[in-house]
Every structure is written in C-alpha cells, then in structure tokens.
Amino acid sequence: MMHRACFEVVGRSFRDIMKNELEPFGGKVMVFSGDHRQILPVLNAATRAETLEACFKSSPLWSHLRQVRLTENMRVLTAPDPASAAELAEFSDFLLQIGKVDIQLTPISVRTAYAFRVTCARADARWDDEETKENEDMETPPKFNLLPPTETPPDRNVGDPDEDRRKQNVNALIDAVYPGAGDENLPDEYFVERAILAPTNASVRRINDMVSEHLSGETKEYLSVDSLEGVADPNMFKQEFLNSLNFSGIPPHRIVLKIGIPIIMIRNLNSDAGLCNGTRLRVTSLRERSIEATIMSGPFKRKRVFISRIIFYNEDDDKEFPFKIRRKQFPVVPAFAMTINKAQGQSIHHVGTYLKFPVLAYGQLYVALSRVTSRKAIKIAVDPEAIDEDGNIHTNVQMCL
C-alpha cells in the first residue's frame, strides 16, 4: 500500500495546475484501485499508530472519495465445471476472511479455518479427510498442501538436529515447487510461474542458495565494494564488518549466480529498456563487469540486456546504524525465492510459502496465500518447532492479526 503522502502530493500538484484550491485534486475526477487487505505502508522502526497514520484512509482526502466495491468473482463465473467453481469460491471466501480478520481465535476455529493441521505424513502431503472428521462438529479445513515436517533419522550423526530438520523441510519445499529444476533445457515460463515466498530476507537468501545448488553449472561470485560516507575516519570499521551488513532494498555483499538461473531487479535501472524494480530475468552470460540476461515476461519479454554495478546507500533515517554506507554492487538477486512484500501485486501459478518465523505484519499472510488462484497451487512449509503437541500451527495467524 502506498503512503498517504504520495496521494496528497498529487492532490496539491493538481490544485496548483488547475488554480483550484477549494476542491480535491483541483476538481479533477480521480480513480484509485487497490486492496486494503494487503500490506500496509512500510516505515522504518514505526509504531502501530504511525503505520496507521501513514495509510491513505487516514488522509483528509479519504472523506471525499466514493467507494465502489467489486462483487463478482470472475474466476468462479468462468470455471469449467460446478466443482471447480465451488472450490474457487471456497478459497476466495477463505482469503477474504483472512484479509478482513473475521475468524474468531477460538481453539476450534484456529484449528479448522485458519491453522494448518498436520494430520498425516503421506507423500502428497494432503489433508487426511477421515482424520479431520473425527469430531463431527469440526468443519473440514481448507485443503492446503502442507508439507509434513521431516525427522532426522536416528542413525544420522548431526550436530544440530533442529537445523538439519529445517534444511530437510526447505529441500522438500524446493522439490515441490521446482520439480526437475536441474534440467538445463527448462523454458523461461517454468521460472516465471514459480516462486517461494518467505517473510524475511534472511530466509529468502538461504532458499535461493539452496535452490541454486540443485542446478548444474559453474558458479560465479560477485563481491561488493563497501565504504563509509560522511565520517571523519573512513577506516573506523573493518571491511569485514561492512561486508557483513545487510540492508533492505540493497543487495548483499556476496552474490552467487549461475548461467540459466532467474534473477530479479531490486532497483530501477532503465525503464525504457524494461529494467525496473521487480523485473525478472534469466542469466545468459556472467562477465567480470557485467551480467547478460534476457527479460522473462512483460512487454520486453526475451529482450537481451546488460546489467552493470551501481552505487547503493542505506536510508538517511536508518536508526540501526549511525552512519551511511556506500555499496557498489549489481542491482539483482536470485529470484527462486522472494519476500512476501516483494511478491505483492504478482500472480504466480505455483507458490511455496516458507514460514520458519511468523509473518511480521498485517496483510502478509493474506498476500502470501492470495498469489495463486486456487489452494492446490500453494505448498506450505513451517518450522517443526511451530507445531504444537496437537499438530496445530496457529502462531503465524495470531501474529498476522
């Protein structure tokens, strides 16, 4: 969701252009579209009150708008058969309940309507309908493909069993979302239609590294050049410390790529050439000072482009670090996985959701589950420690609320 200041700036500009200070937007008719169930404006270290104040609904302009709601589900109307229509309608209603937070957090409703109950460990990781109907008063839960938690075999000698289980869970999710990823002849559409979503950048980086390991080919490592800006002593911190820092919207110090893997732009580079924030590309050549790639979708599909390093700075209002860092690095990262925030607005045919940690903010769970058109197209993996003794997982939902 955009910050209210964006709309207010446009409103002031129109009033100035039209020389009409009395009417909103200078008397011009404006049409805004969006979904307020999605993620709220992201503010650095903001309180809940500050976040709500940044929403468009908190702007004085909101009282001048007339709301028109869409009521017909076109996917349901165009479904090939009644069974498919009923399934699509059920999934749509479930998403609306998540977005509107209509479900009461009682033990029964958490288990049936919201949480993902691990009832069996079958190969297809589906719900066991007979087991969920043990209590006739319980509604059948939505049939998400929850990957069952893996266990470390007792004969394996591992230093950290919990970490080993997490790695196995991620590998199971990768196999479910990217089957046959090691094939060298996969078309671009294979990667465009798939993504693994996670709440944090740390989880995304880990998943991207693990998926890359499934692909054959030589890897190439690109390291950034980091330095301090605006300080009396540029050498006050060791280079290793600067390299270890990660910032939102800035690529990491170390980027590892292979020919044929998908990447995503994280900064606007050249809109005329299709190189905008969020553009997904596929690597065709890795050079010392540039990356050659082809755009995989959109009006610039199959266009060959060359990407060079650019300079990034952390935010001026960054409260975590009392200095400004200058990082020269390629404005791309691997695109097997992406944050839930980055996926907002995208439609993806096959989605995996990795919830090692609870979702971080209002709207994230809604965004993660609504990237697909049906529940069959989404796979979910969670941290085994998040599953309680009854096999229920509801921490993620409560955090979302």
Image: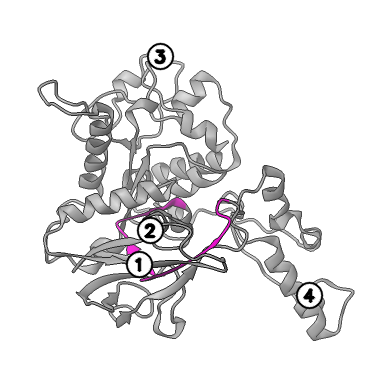
Q: Whole-percent x and y of residue 16?
A: 81, 82
Residue found farthest to the right? 22
Residue 182, magenta (yes or no): no
Q: Whole-percent x and y of residue 60?
A: 81, 60
Q: Secondary structure at mark 3?
A: loop
* Residue type marked 4: Arg
Find out whether the residues at labels 3 and 1 contact each other: C-beta distance under 8 Å: no
Q: Secondary structure at mark 1?
A: loop
Give the left or right position of residue 175, taking residue 74 as reference.
left
Q: Which residue is mark 1?
A: 224
* Residue type marked 2: Asn
Residue 331, magenta (yes or no): yes
Q: Which residue is mark 2?
A: 243
Quadrant housing the N terminus? bottom right
- Give the mark, 2 or 3, whose residue is nearer the N terminus: 3
- Look at the picture and state if 116 lies above or below 91: above
Residue segment shown in magenta: 320-340
Q: Residue at 32% across / 48% down in the picture?
A: 377
Is residue 65 something that shows in the picture?
A: yes
Q: Residue at 66% across / 61% down in the picture?
A: 3
Give the left or right position of residue 158, taking residue 74 as reference.
left
Find out whether the residues at labels 1 and 2 contact each other: C-beta distance under 8 Å: yes
Q: Quadrant of residue 263?
A: bottom left
- Give the mark, 2 or 4, whose residue is nearer the N terminus: 4
Find out whether the residues at labels 3 and 4 contact each other: C-beta distance under 8 Å: no
Q: Which residue is mark 4?
A: 12
* Residue type marked 3: Asn
Q: Whole-percent x and y of residue 8?
A: 75, 68
